[in-house]
Amino acid sequence: MSRRCDLTGKTANNGFTISHSHRRTKRIQHVNLQTKRVWWPQGNRWVKLKLSTKAIKTLEKKGLATMAKEAGINLNHY
């Protein structure tokens, strides 16, 4: 399984670690992913998703059905 948010599609970002002498080495900035069970009222069941923390905050505001529709996700497969 990849490190990718199920709803937003966020993935890792490439960057540099810069030392005091300004020597640059490559590093990866990973997404803050959390495994979360979310209640899906239309399906009348819990859905287990791997979400970024930003997606969790947005989920509380918009709702699961709206975000899944925007992402083009069929929640019956989760």
Image (tube, rainbow, N blue to C red):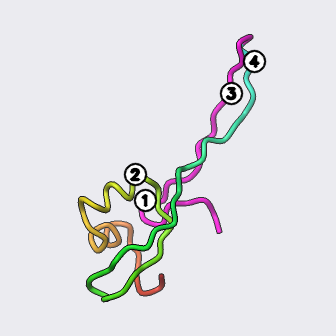
Q: Amino acid at mark 2?
A: Lys
| Label 4 close to label 1 by CB (< 8 Å) | no
Residue at image location 55% in from the left, 60% down from the top? 4
Circle 3 or circle 1, nearest the eye:
3
Residue 68's quadrant in the figure? bottom left
Q: Disc 1 designates what residue?
A: 8
Query: Which numbered disc, 3 or 1, marks the residue that appears first in the sequence?
Result: 1
Res 54 label:
2
Q: Amino acid at mark 4?
A: Arg
| Label 1 close to label 2 by CB (< 8 Å) | yes
Circle 2 or circle 4, nearest the eye:
2
Query: Which numbered disc, 3 or 2, marks the residue that appears first in the sequence?
Result: 3
Q: Mark 3 packing: few (<14 Cα in 10 Å), some, or many (20+)?
A: few
Res 17 label:
3
**Rounded to the nearest whole Å, what is the CA distance between mark 4 and mark 1?**
34 Å
Q: Is residue 36 left or right of residue 25?
A: left
The quadrant the N terminus occupies is bottom right
Res 46 label:
none
> How would you classify the magenta stretch by its main secondary structure?
loop
Magenta residues (range): 1-21
